[in-house]
Image (cartoon, grey):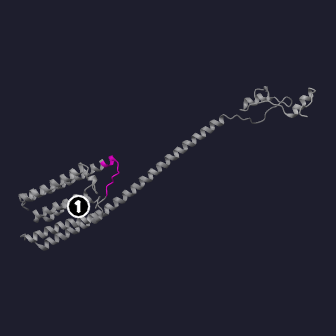
Amino acid sequence: MIQRSNIGRDEPDIRAQQRLRMKRHAMAMATYIIVIISLFVTNTFGFGRLSPLHWWLIIGLSISGNIVFFVLIVSNWNLRLPDPSLTWWQILYAGLVIVVILYAVPNMRPTMLLFFIPSFSFGMLRLPRRDYLSLVAWVMGFYSLLLMVEYLQGRPDFNVMYELFLYIVFGIVLTWFAFFGGFISNIRRRLKIQAEAIQKAHAEIQLEMEERKKAQIEKDQVILELKEALSKVKTLSGLLPICASCKKIRDDKGYWNQLESYITHHTDAAFTHGICPECTKKTLADAGLSDPSK
């Protein structure tokens, strides 16, 4: 029954949820106090007479029940239960207490029934419609048991039609609250699902942006490395003034440089010397020597 708890939630989130549950529990205790004060006023003005047994029973149930719920929340035992908020159980317990009050002051029954509505509305943002309707069934079952006991005891002022009228009206009101509360809870759950989907999409976008940022950084690094590599490459371009006879090259300052010297200075190329076959023949011929290859 009721909603399942999220065991894997972060510790700060659990503490925040527990603080919220304590605030809701404090509001529930305040409701019990208001009901007891109303009973005191009812008794004082003579609209209903509560015996000492009734007082002890009502106050005892109010205090003991709230102590149990308080201990469950403070000790974090509620986190082990299917519904850590204890909403369903607190409303059910409030229904049991209100039935005892109805038995103690039957002539103030319509007024006392109104005090259960605030307690019943506590589940409006927590309980789905099915759980709300189950609460209606339990509370109306308590109420019908009360009426049966009063009828069998032969309460002097027991009016069957009047009590049946109150029973039906109260059941209609609770059922309407159950459907309305279930509708609100359903909207809340859908909004929560949408919010989680938005958060997931936001996280995916953030991850994609981080990956793109990383890729851009790597791209910039590659471009920087290519620029550094290109800066080290020396090339020759344009028209080079070269002597038609000795093949020297004139530099920008007007000096004539040996071809090897000029190319070595302006590029990363290096020279190693050899002699081609034509020059070999010419050199040997000039020296009066025969070609050894023949």
Judge by depth and name the residue closer to the eye, 270 or 14.
270
Q: Residue at x 19, y 53 (%)?
A: 68
Give the overall secondary structure of the magenta segment: loop
Quadrant housing the N terminus: bottom left
Amino acid type shown at disc 1 = Phe
Image side of residue 181 versus residue 252, left or right: left
Within the image, what quadrant is residue 191 found in?
bottom left
Residue 162 against residue 202 in the figure, above or below = below
Secondary structure of the residue carrying tag 1 is: helix
| Residue pointed to by mark 1 | 120
Question: Magenta span has 176?
Answer: no
What stretch of residues is rendered in magenta? 4-14
Within the image, what quadrant is residue 150 found in?
bottom left
Quadrant housing the C terminus: top right
- Sort mark 1 into few (<14), some (14-19) or many (20+) by Cα contacts within 10 Å: many
Q: Residue at x 10, y 58 (%)?
A: 57
- Residue 35, x across and y down, in percent: 15, 57
Image side of residue 207 versus residue 27, left or right: right
Image side of residue 164 versus residue 122, left or right: left
- Residue 209, x across and y down, in percent: 49, 47
Question: Magenta span has 7?
Answer: yes
